[in-house]
Amino acid sequence: MHRPSKLPMNKREFLRHLGTAGAVAILPRLALAAPSAATARADDIRLIAAWRSLHALAPDGTARGPAQDKPTDYVGILAPDWQRGQVRIQSAVPVPARVHGLLAEGDGGFVACANRPGTWLLRCDADGRIAARHDLGDETGGRTLNGHAVFDPSGEWLLTTESEADTTQGWVSVRRRDTLRKEAQWSTRGIEPHELAFAADGQLLVANGGILRAAGDRKRDLDRMDSSLVRLDARSGERLGQWWLDDKRLSLRHLAIGTAAGERPLVGIALQAEHADAAERAAAPILAIWNGDELTLPSRETLGGGYCGDIAVGPDRGFYLSAERRNLVARWHADAPGRLDVIASLDKAGALAEIELGGGRGALIGSPRGLGLWHPQLDPVLLRWPVELAPDNHWTAQTA
């Protein structure tokens, strides 16, 4: 699982979390530039996000009173206000624990998946109201969610990654979109599956994180790690291929589906190192690339400290990578595969969402300091949060 810096659980930890890690933000080129005309026209962009806050929030996102002693987890809709330099909370749904993966639906709604080893799923409508909820405790098998889900290309079925509590054996459950109830299941041919995504050919890719888990979600027997990328038939679950890295202590976690020249697949995979030696772990690469035939490590640069929290598709056969423990975001490009370029330095930079603006593809970056925009053709911007909050691991952009 992606575990960034642990989200604070009480008021003192929360305020310390917001006040650490040096500069507020340093985004390349012009530091904190004013919003450009192109971003001002992007008023229809909104974010499906999860966050933790000391403030009790109403369903419409307004603060109900003074800060509480204990933070609350929320999921909902955030809207950038480029002119005012602030983010508006359009909806806020309190949830019992952290959210991990988030999926936008075509009608404006979204699905939220509990953080591993959670057991609940939520589906909300376009206004952020709960339309369906489901708990795996109501199913047989004793499985837990691994934090991610994806809709099949038709949008009718929701697929979730799950693990057996005792063995950590991995499964994909095929669920009805409307009720979230399971109708079928497939083995992932591995342990601790994390993110899954549909490739351009319509087949399913699953990143098996490969980490054995003990009670309390504690990692165990890391010398027995078995992380892999598996390709499954999207109709039957049949294994069509499976790939491993030579370094068995690199866990494949998150996926971004891109396309190389000539429409060949180009999939970026965020890595998290689990080496016993701290120096070896910090020097580990953070990106793997799958081209349909091979799984490779294109860059050995160490700027990520062996830990990539999120990945998003960038412009021109590239990817954005968040290195949260190093407070920066990097960009990788297929034309210079051995290099990672730092595009933003931002406290605890974590969640990434790709956006199309001004004829190019940029990234929205989550941080306790605010929402950052980096775009290859626009001036960088940092928007303030309306209240103190800590965004969680992932978010996704949609057009209102």
Image: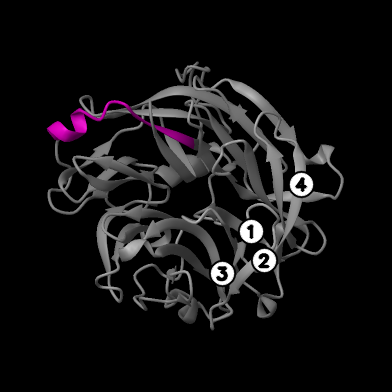
Measuring from the top left, give residue 326's x and y in whole percent: 37, 62
* Mark 1 touches mark 2? (CB < 8 Å): yes
Instruction: Please indicate whether residue 390 sits to the left or right of residue 299 in the image.
Output: right
Residue that numbered label 4 is attached to: 184
* Mark 1 touches mark 3? (CB < 8 Å): no
* C-alpha separation, residue under disc 1 versus residue under disc 3: 23 Å
Residue that numbered label 2 is attached to: 239
Q: Which amino acid, by three-letter code, is at mark 2?
A: Arg
Residue that numbered label 1 is attached to: 233
Q: In which quarter of the image is residue 334?
A: bottom left
Say if the magenta span includes residue 293: no
Dot 2 falls on a residue whose secondary structure is: strand
The first of marks 3 and 4 along the sequence is 4
Q: Nearer the viewer, residue 55 or 178?
A: 178
* Mark 2 touches mark 3? (CB < 8 Å): no
Q: Which amino acid, by three-letter code, is at mark 3?
A: Ser
Residue 208 visible in the shown view:
no
Chain part drawn in magenta: 36-49
Q: Which amino acid, by three-letter code, is at mark 1?
A: Asp
Give the label on residue 251, or none.
3
* C-alpha separation, residue under disc 2 versus residue under disc 3: 20 Å
Q: Quadrant of residue 228?
A: bottom right
Q: Which amino acid, by three-letter code, is at mark 4?
A: Ala
The first of marks 1 and 4 along the sequence is 4
Instruction: Please indicate whether residue 320 sits to the left or right of residue 197 in the image.
Output: left
Measuring from the top left, give residue 150's x and y in whole percent: 57, 45
Residue 248 visible in the shown view:
yes
The first of marks 2 and 4 along the sequence is 4
